């Protein structure tokens, strides 16, 4: 294993971390380390990752368990801070933020889609979708209209008053996607979004993600299934806390013709 | 804006609590009984003491009451049956008190005599009170009909009598009371007024041996009955000479009551070395009763406070369980962008909703229990405003205090760990 940085689609330069991001760059990681202490040993979950993500791109991250892909997603999702190095999201250095600021960044720039949907059972579909709006201070008719609009966008017409448990897995994941979109995030983070769904439903969810990508959303998706990975523009493989390879996928029918 | 947000948070809290109805109800029970116990206990205590205080107050808190009292050593010598007991307050005492103290605004003397009232064959044992017009101002009793004894009655030595409502009913039995002639012992008296009877401890029962008073001018009493009274008991006769049976001293202000009472007592002790008088100061009794009441309330309050504490711990226990159960929800909210303080707020609102609604049900029960005690056990009770306010404050306080720890624990969870929690 080399400690060298791997090639990126957008050319990586040795810019200083504080420098402003180019217009089309949403995320930049420079020499990011994440170290956990297990007993009396330090384990590097991330070992010096450099990465640049272009606005509007669609990425699939894969790797065996322990490769660091979950840590990577948590970090990208601002649920965690790097131990070392810099992570710039929309030009802001995440390493230097307080817990409250991190919450604000998640609220403003990020949307999450999880494997287990992670909807709140006591809230209705509409309330689940509007939850980020609630924390942004948007309520009442405004929130309700926005939730309805998003539900339509993800193909959930008239189920706004239902509880999540009354919906099928595919529908629940659509609710989760609508919720992730409600704050109009810079980056959509998806953790095995089809992992709990059958193939047909999974394909329809992927088709929805592709549609969002076609509309210009930046999507970072963790998956271990090659079929699902194929939907993305770029496939990143991780190993031992490092980016092992990055490759461009051939065009996929769901993704439309556009390419970076 | 903030209002609607708060309202929404509260609604969300209620909704979450309603998801676990059984658990929420059981949690609330601690508060319900705690608050209910506080209010009910204080109501029972308050009711009991308020009646005692009322009776003392009716004696007049500005008054000092001095009674003649048979000295102990003389009362014991019943063997000599022709002997005359001479004791008690003197006409001179009345004059001395009236003239020696600046703080005394008036002194009302009373002779208390036994007499038999007769109206056309009806006979009633009476306690004759020979007194002055001032008596009716000091001992406030409502006038039902006619008038009280006046200064003119005294000047004219008028043979008039004022009856109590109870006495008038028993003696005159529905006849026109005013103007009726009553034979008392050997003289006729004209009824000029009727006043309300003294209320007794239990208002529903009429104690048969209660004094039925009849009021006559004091100089008429002296003239007709003299100072010597004869009483017979089991074959032996005893004679007593008592000039005045009672003096009611009114002091100009409450602040002077205790010092004046002390001064009068010293003076009387010099003139009455036998100790043939007793003095009671309603104000002192009132203070004493209030002190007793305070102690009583503290004891009751502590007991109720302990039950509230247990209720609070119950709430904390359940909320801690709830935090564990809802770890994933906390993770989701944090991932979406909720700040720690927003999570704290959410859990805090839930405990406050729980404890406040428990508190309000408790207030209902706390008011119901005294009401039932009054109805079924015939005990006076009084729910006080401050005990209700106190319970509300306590239940909110318990919600905040005991909800804080679980809420902080929820907020300090690492969102990554919380999300992974199943």
Image (tube, coloured by chain):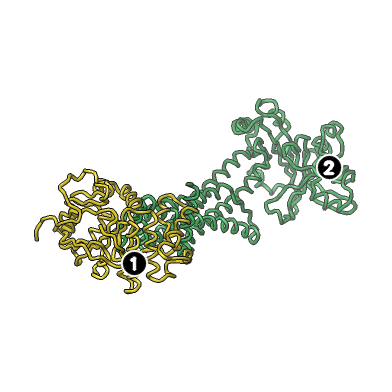
Chain colours: A yellow, B green
Would residue B387 appear left or right of B408 to someone viewing this image?
A: right
Of badges 1 and 2, the one in the foreground is 1
On residue A81, the disc is none
What is the residue that sits farthest to the left in this orientation?
A2
Would residue B174 appear left or right of B269 to someone viewing this image?
A: right
- Residue B350 spot, x, y in % from top left: 44, 56
Mark 1, other Cα within 10 Å: few <14 / some 14–19 / many ≥20? some
- Note whether residue B158 is visible: yes
Do dots 1 and 2 share one subunit? Answer: no
Which quadrant holds residue A245? bottom left
Q: Are marks 1 and 2 in contact (CB under 8 Å)?
A: no
Residue annotated with mark 1: A207
Q: Residue at x 86, y 40 (%)?
A: B160
Which quadrant holds residue A18? top left
Callout 1: SS: helix
Callout 2: SS: strand
- Residue B256 spot, x, y in % from top left: 61, 30
Would residue B10 appear left or right of B196 to someone viewing this image?
A: left
- Chain containing the residue with disc 2: B
Q: Residue at x 55, y 53 (%)?
A: B39
Residues B397 and B19: in front is B19
- Residue B220 spot, x, y in % from top left: 83, 37
Residue annotated with mark 2: B193
Q: Residue at x 66, y 36 (%)?
A: B63
Would residue A187 appear left or right of B256 to someone viewing this image?
A: left
Q: Is residue A101 above or below residue A43?
A: above
Q: Is residue B11 above or below residue B152?
A: below
Residues B340 and A130: in front is A130
Report how far apart the C-alphas of labels 1 and 2 lie in the structure. Answer: 103 Å
Mark 2, other Cα within 10 Å: few <14 / some 14–19 / many ≥20? many
- Chain containing the residue with disc 1: A
Dividing the image into 4 quarters, which one contains the C terminus of chain B?
bottom left
């Amino acid at each position: 294993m080399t400690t060298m940085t791997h090639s990126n689609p957008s050319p990586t330069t040795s810019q200083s971390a504080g420098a402003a991001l180019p217009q089309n760059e949403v995320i930049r990681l420079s020499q990011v380390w994440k170290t956990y202490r297990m007993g009396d040993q330090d384990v590097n979950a991330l070992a010096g990752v450099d990465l640049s993500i272009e606005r509007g791109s669609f990425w699939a991250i894969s790797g065996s368990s322990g490769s660091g892909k979950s840590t990577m997603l948590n970090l990208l999702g601002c649920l965690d801070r790097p131990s070392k190095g810099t992570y710039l999201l929309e030009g802001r250095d995440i390493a230097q933020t307080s817990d409250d600021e991190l919450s604000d960044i998640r609220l403003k720039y990020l949307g999450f889609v999880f494997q287990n949907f992670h909807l709140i059972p006591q809230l209705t579909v509409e309330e689940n979708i509007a939850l980020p709006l609630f924390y942004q201070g948007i309520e009442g008719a405004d929130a309700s209209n926005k939730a309805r609009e998003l539900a339509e966008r993800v193909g959930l017409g008239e189920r706004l008053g239902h509880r999540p448990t009354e919906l099928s897995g595919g529908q629940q994941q659509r609710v989760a996607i609508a919720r992730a979109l409600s704050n109009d995030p810079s980056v959509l983070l998806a953790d095995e979004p089809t992992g709990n769904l059958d193939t047909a439903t999974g394909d329809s969810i992927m088709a929805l993600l592709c549609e969002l990508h076609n509309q210009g959303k930046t999507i970072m998706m963790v998956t271990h299934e090659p079929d699902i990975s194929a939907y993305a523009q770029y496939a990143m493989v991780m190993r031992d806390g490092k980016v092992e390879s990055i490759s461009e996928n051939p065009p996929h029918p769901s993704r439309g013709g556009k390419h970076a | 804006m903030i209002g609607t947000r708060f309202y929404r948070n509260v609604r969300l809290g209620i909704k979450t609590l309603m998801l676990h109805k059984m658990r929420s109800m059981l949690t609330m029970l601690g508060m319900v009984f705690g608050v209910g116990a506080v209010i009910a206990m204080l109501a029972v205590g308050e009711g009991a003491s308020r009646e005692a205080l009322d009776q003392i107050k009716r004696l007049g808190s500005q008054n000092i009451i001095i009674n003649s009292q048979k000295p102990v050593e003389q009362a014991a010598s019943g063997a000599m049956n022709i002997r005359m007991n001479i004791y008690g307050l003197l006409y001179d005492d009345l004059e001395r008190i009236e003239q020696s103290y600046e703080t005394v605004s008036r002194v009302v003397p009373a002779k208390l005599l036994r007499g038999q009232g007769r109206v056309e064959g009806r006979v009633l044992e009476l306690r004759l009170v020979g007194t002055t017009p001032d008596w009716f101002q000091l001992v406030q009793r409502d006038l039902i009909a006619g008038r009280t004894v006046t200064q003119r009655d005294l000047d004219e030595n008028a043979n008039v009598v004022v009856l109590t409502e109870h006495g008038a009913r028993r003696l005159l039995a529905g006849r026109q009371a005013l103007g009726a002639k009553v034979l008392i012992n050997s003289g006729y008296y004209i009824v000029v007024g009727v006043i309300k009877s003294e209320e007794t401890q239990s208002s529903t029962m009429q104690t048969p041996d209660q004094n039925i008073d009849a009021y006559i001018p004091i100089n008429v009493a002296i003239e007709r009955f003299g100072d010597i009274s004869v009483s017979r008991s089991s074959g032996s006769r005893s004679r007593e000479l008592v000039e005045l049976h009672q003096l009611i001293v009114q002091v100009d202000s409450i602040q002077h009551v205790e010092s004046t009472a002390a001064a009068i007592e010293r003076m009387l002790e010099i003139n009455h070395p036998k100790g043939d008088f007793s003095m009671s100061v309603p104000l002192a009794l009132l203070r004493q009763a209030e002190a007793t009441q305070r102690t009583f309330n503290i004891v009751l309050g502590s007991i109720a406070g302990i039950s509230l504490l247990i209720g609070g711990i119950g709430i904390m226990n359940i909320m801690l369980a709830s935090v564990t159960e809802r770890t994933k929800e906390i993770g989701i909210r944090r991932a979406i962008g909720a700040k720690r303080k927003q999570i704290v707020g959410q859990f805090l609102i839930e405990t406050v909703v729980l404890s406040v609604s428990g508190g309000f049900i408790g207030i209902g029960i706390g008011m119901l229990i005294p009401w039932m005690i009054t109805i079924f056990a015939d005990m006076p009770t009084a729910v006080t405003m401050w005990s209700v306010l106190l319970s509300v404050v306590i239940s909110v306080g318990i919600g905040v205090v005991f909800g804080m720890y679980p809420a902080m624990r929820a907020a300090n969870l690492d969102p990554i760990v919380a999300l992974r929690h199943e």
